[in-house]
Amino acid sequence: MASALFLALSGAPALAGTVWVASQQGARLSRIEAGAVTEGAAVPSAPATVAAGGRLLFLSHPDGRAITVAEAGTGRVLRRLSYAGQVFGLAASADGRTVFATDWSGHRVDRISAEDGRVEGSAATGRDPAHLVLDRAGRLFVADRESRQVSVIDAARMERIATIPVGEAPFALALDPAQARLYVGNVRGNSLTVIDTAALKPVATVPAGAMPYGVAVGPDGARVLVTNQGAGTVTVLNAQTMKIAATIGVGRYPEGIVVAGEGGAARAYVANWFSDDVSVIDLTSLKVVARLPVAEGPRSLTVAGEGGR
């Protein structure tokens, strides 16, 4: 059973609310709400990833060895947390009090106080840990890019409890809404590995397009969406059959992808790194319905609750 500290944690992606986009070269957060973009406040240089937790946003700065903390309602920067490593992937607790960070060069993941940056625990991973997700049971799943595996870490004890073999160069991760499956994008394998989260074993590896850099799951769990950086497309897979249902053209070098909204209002948002915009995909028609300009070099997105609540 998860400890009391982690009963409030949730690794499931929010399916309604505000979409925030982190632009690396532009050093800025952009806010997408009701189909419109509001340019947010400037942030420290070269943010790589963004994650939401409670009323807060967290941005990683691998070159700056820091994590920026901002308001999820406004994007206003609150503070900078120094980090003794090359921070890359981030995941946050549902209350925003704790942030988990992968150290790309240190081959570990740290549990960090969002208030003062104090490291509260660390666990070893494989080589070059990239993205990570946190589930409701208090487990962290970490994509160990150069070890061809996913590390599973008990977030309360900060202890690795399993390693799961996947494809070549795992990078992006997404849980389905029931958290029964974890989808892993293997960048150099051009594939997607499906993991049974109860058994902690892979159940399938299927083709997913050229250089899968981002993964998201629809609100009903029926579709898995994978960005293909090398092809400028999003591959849509049927989650039951794992067959490709559609291939959708987006911008140049798509990376991060998130889903927001429910039912017929559900949309996928794709950060096009080299196009300086976000493609919006209607999940009913599986067509791009908008291209929204943002600051230079968008790479990562997250979904916060309405107004950051």
Image (spheres, rainbow, N blue to C red):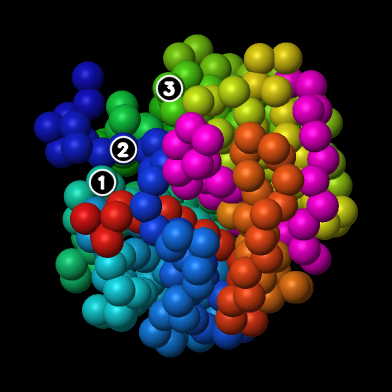
Residue 107 percent coordinates (x, y) = 53, 53
* Mark 1 residue type: Ala
Check if mark 2's residue and mark 1's residue have beta carbons within 8 Å.
yes
Determine if the magenta segment contains residue 256.
Answer: yes
Which residues are the magenta region? 242-268
Q: Which residue is mark 1?
A: 94
Q: Residue at x 43, y 87 (%)?
A: 42
- Picture layout, residue 131 above or below residue 40: above
Between 180 and 188, the one nearer to me in the picture: 180
Rendering quarter of residue 198 = top left
Between 109 and 31, the one nearer to me in the picture: 31
Farthest residue to the left: give it: 4
In which quadrant of the rendered image does the N terminus lie? top left
Residue 179 as seen in the image, left or right of residue 182: left
Mark positioned earlier in the residue sequence (2 or 1)? 2
Residue 193 as seen in the image, left or right of residue 62: right
Determine if the magenta segment contains residue 41.
Answer: no
User: Rounded to the nearest whole Å, what is the CA distance between mark 3 and mark 2?
Assistant: 11 Å
- Picture layout, residue 53 above or below residue 190: below
Q: Residue at x 27, y 61 (%)?
A: 307
